[in-house]
Amino acid sequence: MTRTNIPSLNDAPSILLVHGALTDASVWNEVTRRLQAGGHTVSAPALAMRSLDKDAAYVAGVLGRIPGPVVLVGHSYAGAVISHPAIAACDNVKALVFIAAFQPDAGEAAGELNEKFPGSLLTPDNLNVVPNPNGGQDLTLRPERFAEVYAADVDRAHAAVMAASQRPVEPGVLGQQLPGEPAWRTLPSWALVSTSDRSLPPAILRFMAERAGSHVVKVDSSHAAPVSQPAAVTDLILQAVNTSASADAISH
């Protein structure tokens, strides 16, 4: 009689959640709570967002400290980070999950992709760009425009807190090209398309996800999907986790 390997929670990959521009790791708070309640091991580091290559190197360093397999999740700009060739070189990454996120190909930049289709409200009149005291510049959304552009389906009081605590991005980062073959070419991927997104047009999210061959789920959400739709985001992450655990169990 042949015994089938059924994955248990002990076999499940760890989950690494990476935030995007204009937010910090707190964007994952409710998703993290749900995953931890299910017994999963979760990490949510903070990015400097001064350089795409440096952000990817930092995430690769975090991955190197996590024992065992990992499902890597990126929101928004972090999709470019987890697509970076430095991530493909990390042997413990088993799957990628893109939450309303960029999925650039070699030679593409996030800012360029966001202009491929109309509909983004990340326009100069909605943005603030100021000098950074340490050099360079800081780009944020105007606080009074944050809810409409980024978090239209988030409780207004919560959106106001998000607007006040934005983590700025160096504007030049959004023009930095992916320097080689993306990680999604060699790793299985899942993608959430936020169909009411006013930051990344749904058309570009669909284009990138379909091009990457990702398993796609469409959710009626603003760009702040981890905050406004934590159940749907958690479910998609768990699809990747369970598929990865099953594949690992079969291979052993």
Image (cartoon, helix red, strand yellow):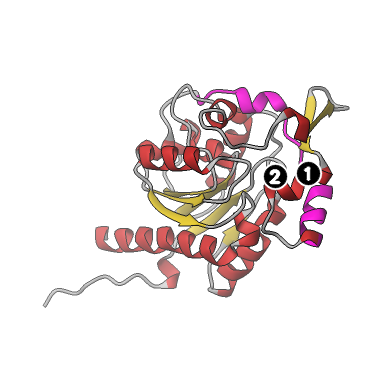
| Residue visible at 54% across and 36% down in the picture | 80
The location of residue 57, given as percent across then percent down, is 58, 34
**Mark 2 crowdedness (10 Å alpha carbons): few <14, some 14-19, many ≥20:** many
Expressed as whole percent of the image width and height from the top left, the position of residue 241 reads 43, 61
Judged from this view, the residue extending furthest toward the bottom is 1
Quadrant assignment for the C terminus = bottom left
Q: Amino acid at mark 2?
A: Val
Give, as a single range, the part of the protein colored magenta.
Answer: 157-178
Amino acid type for the residue under numbered disc 1: Arg
Q: What quarter of the picture does the N terminus occupy?
A: bottom left
Looking at the picture, tell me which residue is in the foreground, 200 or 165: 200
Q: Quadrant of residue 8?
A: bottom left
User: Callout 2: helix, strand or loop?
Assistant: helix
Crowding near the residue tagged with mark 1, few <14, some 14–19, many ≥20 C-alpha atoms within 10 Å: some
- Residue 120 percent across, percent down from the top left: 62, 37
The question of residue 201 being in magenta is answered with no
Q: Is residue 166 magenta?
A: yes
Residue farthest right in this picture = 133
Q: Which element is circle 1 on?
A: helix
- Residue at image mark 2: 149
* Horizontal arrangement in the rendering, residue 105 relative to residue 176 (left or right): left
Q: Is residue 30 left or right of residue 251?
A: right
Residues at badges 1 and 2 in contact (C-beta under 8 Å)?
A: yes
